[in-house]
Amino acid sequence: MSQSAEILFGDIHNHNALGYGIGSLERAIDIAQTHLDFFAFTGHSSWHDMVPMEGGRESHWLKGFEKLKSGWGKVQELIADANRVPDFNAFLGFEWHSSRFGDQCVVFADDFQPLVYPDHISDLRKFCRQKQALMIPHHIAYPEGHRGVNWSVFDECCTPVVEVFSEHGNSEHDRGPFAYFNHSMGPRETSQTVRAALENGFRFGFVASSDSHSGFPGAYGEGLMAVHSRGRDRQSIIQAINNRHTYALTGDRCLIDFSVDGHLMGSTIAAGETAEIAYRVECPDAIDVVEIIQDGGIVHRDYPTAPVDEATVPETPFHVRFEWGWGPWGDLALERIADWEFDLTLEGGKILDIFPCLQSGPFDEDRRHRFDRKSDHQLSVISYSSRRGAYRQNPNQSLVVKMTGDPSTRLNVNFKKPTEERSSVTVEQLQKGSVTGFTGPFPKECFHWHRLVLPNESRVSGTVTISPGSKRSYAYLRVKQENGHVAWTSPVFMNYA
């Protein structure tokens, strides 16, 4: 990865009961501090051109706006207090709704900032300029006039990035995966997408955030962003976003370097007849394909190398995913929340890092996911799972362990909840296939050791020469994992001066 910057992960668009979501802000901050480097709370603030709805249902939104307004002092205090935790950054923000101009998430660089209620996007932009705040378009691919982005009023000032993915779906283009249907006001419209805007000469970077309405920042599969930041402080993170040194992820935390002629993602450069792209991708799961997109078309594809011999485990780190959940569903009248408590230990191996993959459902104000690294060989986990309120029907929680070992390395899980159970597998077994365990007879919950992910399956790097010529051109990288998760780097913009 880049030697001059650190890759940090965060979610700068999410909601809770201080608006028209659910859950306390205290809970949201606690969750963010459990598994993110930074987050912003962007409470629902206003909708200046909302029309009356059948049966007075606009009260749902209006009551949410009033909750944020009356609780804004509390919000300011809690966000400021969250910044006292080492190696974690919290940002104050709000979401401004507009049928005509599209929704905008305002994110402040500093604490104790005011709410504002403009009726025109130019006034909102003026305020953001004065406060040096970010103004990020959200769910952009909805039709214009229906809270989709209004590209006719787009301005790079205060808007260095746009949200390419959230729990609404994928805005890259109208034929991509993750169509708009969840929490949806309609389908994706071609002219509203990232691809259409780039083709029309607009310049912006890519981010993703969850837009979770259940007070769960960083919800797995609902959107996550990464920044190449020169520091772990708020100003460094804001500067990285303003420089478009960002990339968007659906969930899995891929580490990505992408540059053109040595200039990092998001840069604007002068290019000659040819330019050299360099990329390096390391994912927590098996990579399907890495693609370079130039001016709307795929100009290069790269793939993982051929599998190594099954008996060979490299000395370099590899990944193991452990997943828990499943269980009874509503049609059986047995739907419930299952509490999990277990210890994971390694014999003959070493835990280097862990990557929690936490679903936002089920909502519970008091339950938490906890991951306690006892040593390089032991990890204690407290968690919960349910089909109730599961995002896109996935009830499961999971954890990716980055580790070292050899074929004889043994991974043990000792369960205390939901039942007393023990599972033990070797690295050699997981090279050959996955292993499943059950907490009781059908339809009780179960757990699953995924097949081992070796470095040659999860890392791709290379260089490729493209030909921008003297014309304006852009290029970005997209990586797809075999499990369906996707990441997009911000483009590098060539000859835009």
Image (spheres, helix red, strand yellow):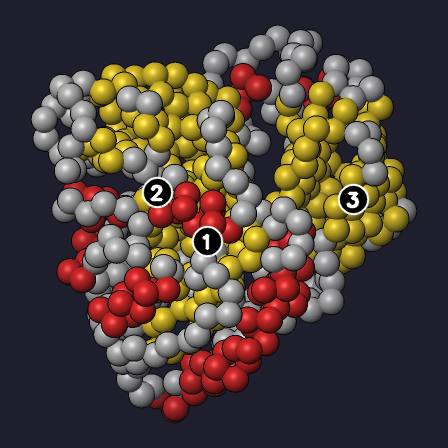
In the image, 352: left or right of 79? right
Q: Is 73 placed left or right of 275 in the picture?
A: right
Q: Residues within 10 Å of mark 2 (few under 14, many from 20)?
A: many
Along the polypeptide, which appears first: circle 1 or circle 2?
Answer: 1
Image coordinates of residue 252 in percent, x first then y, are: 53, 39
- Mark-to-mark CA distance, 1 and 2: 18 Å
Picture layout, residue 77 above or below residue 83: below
Query: In the image shown, does 148 or 206 lie closer to the viewer?
Result: 206
Query: Which of pointers 1 and 3 lies earlier in the amino acid sequence?
Result: 1
CB under 8 Å between discs 1 and 3 = no
Q: Determine whether, in the image, residue 360 is placed left or right of residue 103.
A: right
Separation of residues labelled 1 and 3 (CA atoms): 26 Å
* Residue 372 tag number: 3
Disc 3 to disc 2, C-alpha distance: 35 Å
Give the residue number, with chain letter if any, for mark 1: 209
Query: Judging from the image, what secondary structure is the residue with disc 1 in?
Result: loop
Where residue 216 sits in the image (x, y, percent)? 58, 60
Check disc 3: other Cα within 10 Å, few if <14, some if 14-19, many if 20+: few
Badge 1 amino acid: Ser
Give SS at disc 2.
loop
The residue indicated by pointer 2 is 243
State the residue at coordinates (26%, 78%): 119
Number of numbered tags placed on the structure image: 3
Q: Does residue 63 appear anywhere in the picture?
A: yes
Q: Is residue 317 above or below residue 372?
A: above
Q: Tell me the SS state at disc 3.
A: strand
Mark 3 and mark 2 in contact? Answer it, CB < 8 Å.
Answer: no
Amino acid at circle 3: Asp
Q: Nearer the viewer, mark 1 or mark 2?
A: 2
The numbered disc on residue 457 is none
